[in-house]
Image (tube, helix red, strand yellow):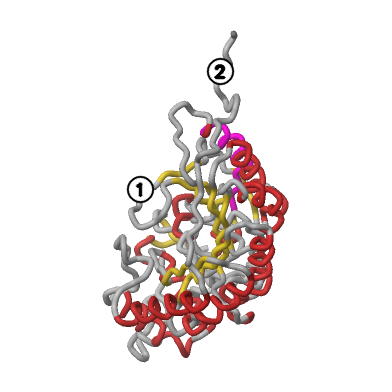
Amino acid sequence: MSRASSHALKHPPVTAPSEPAGAPSPFPELAVAIDRERRRGRGAQSNASGRYEAEARVAFDDGWQSLDELPAFKTTVEIDTARKVITRNDSPDIGFDRSINPYRGCEHGCVYCFARPTHAYLGLSPGLDFESRLYAKPDAPAMLAKELAAPDYEPRMIAIGTNTDPYQPLERERKIMRGILEVLERAGHPVGIVTKSALVARDIDILSRMAKRNLAKVAISVTTLDPQLARTMEPRAPTPPRRLEALKLLAQAGIPTTVMVAPVIPALNDSEIERILDAAAHAGAREASYVLLRLPLEVRDLFREWLMANYPDRYRHVFTLIRDMRGGRDYDSQWGTRMKGTGPMAWMIGRRFEIACEKLGLNKRRSKLTTDHFVKPKGGGQQLSLF
């Protein structure tokens, strides 16, 4: 392994058509992408060090040991020992002020995931580490009950799935999300779920009971109907037909459902907006939303690498359109515009979305959750009265 300063090697440059023709790489000996066989079934192409690391480590063949002998990336799970499970936020452009993330990292491996940079806080890479080195919170249900029972707790909808997917493959074994739902149901607490996994249908029994009391709603992300694009861009997420089937099952059970066309990527999946909405409406969705591709921090380079590896002929066009919608930059984090973008292209995408929703009868009524049924969990870590 070779070491160098983080400034020099943390984010090796990605050769792209936008760079001057024939320009030599500052580090010609470095291969940014991990060998395909080592990352089979993964979304990211590389595993660069996180932005907070003082050093970057880069694998290279020094003639003594072949890189071919390095093992493939395997999913590992560690226990997250956080002392609280409810995360608060004060962002003015999102519709919730609290959320829960049962897991850190996500095995779905969606290359565009805006949550990838959070792995840097753990000293890990937002690249392949994010989708292979996972953290689970098995105590989340118990911690949730304790926090809901706090004397000063005031109920408002809790959003789950806003960072990493609560129904990623690990949930099938760990069932942490199901435990959280059981706590919320007993407490009569409202919850809004975002996922791209068909595994959410496993919990229809709980969700349908909660929905009858206006306590639950579910949004499923459908990025594309193209199976090849989906498998390349979201390698371990359920296929688009399975997500639509989950929407259908949830709707049939009386659970308010939303389809999220997210993210919309210009020149890659934006042509599918109308078809995705049509398929979701026929599956039973009654609400819809969309989010423009976001490329904060390390996500920009990871997406650029992926695009060059899989769709090099579209690279220039995609990034030209992205910059047209982000004020000339790859990303604009300004509240109020970060989700939808600005400019003529962004306006056109928004208008197409609105027209399609109007034709399909989507968003005619918005489901509203209630806190009227909330009852603080008994015990919940509080000292019991002697009398």
In the foreground, 234 or 69: 234
Tell me the quarter of the picture where residue 252 sits. Answer: bottom right
Expressed as whole percent of the image width and height from the top left, the position of residue 30 reads: 47, 74
Q: What residue is drawn where x is 29% and y is 62%?
A: 334
**Are discs 1 and 2 less than 8 Å apart at CB?**
no
Report the residue that reaches farthest toward the left. Answer: 327
Q: Depth check: 34 or 220 in front?
A: 220
| Whole-percent x, y for residue 284 in the image | 62, 68
Horizontal side of residue 335 vs 149, given as left or right: left
Residue sitting nearer the eye, 157 or 114: 157
Residue 210: where, in percent of width, then height?
62, 47
Residue at image coords 49%, 28%: 150
Query: Toward which corner of the image does residue 250 lie, by quadrant?
Result: bottom right
Q: As displayed, is residue 140 above or below residue 241?
A: above
Q: Nearer the viewer, residue 160 or 250?
A: 250
User: Which quarter of the figure has residue 110?
Assistant: bottom right
The residue that mark 2 highlights is 383
Residue 345 appearing in the image: yes
Q: Of callouts 1 and 2, which one flags the residue occurring earlier in the amino acid sequence?
A: 1
**Which residue type carries mark 2?**
Gln
Report if residue 129 is visible in the image: no
Magenta-span inclusion, residue 139? yes
What amino acid is labelled 1 in the image?
Asp
312 sits left or right of 214 in the view: left
Residue at coordinates 55% horizontally, 30% vertically from top-left?
A: 376
Mark number displayed over residue 123? none
Residue designated by label 1: 90
Range covered by the magenta-colored residues: 134-147
In the structure shown, which secondary structural element does the residue marked by tag 1 occupy? loop
Verify whether residue 106 appears in magenta: no
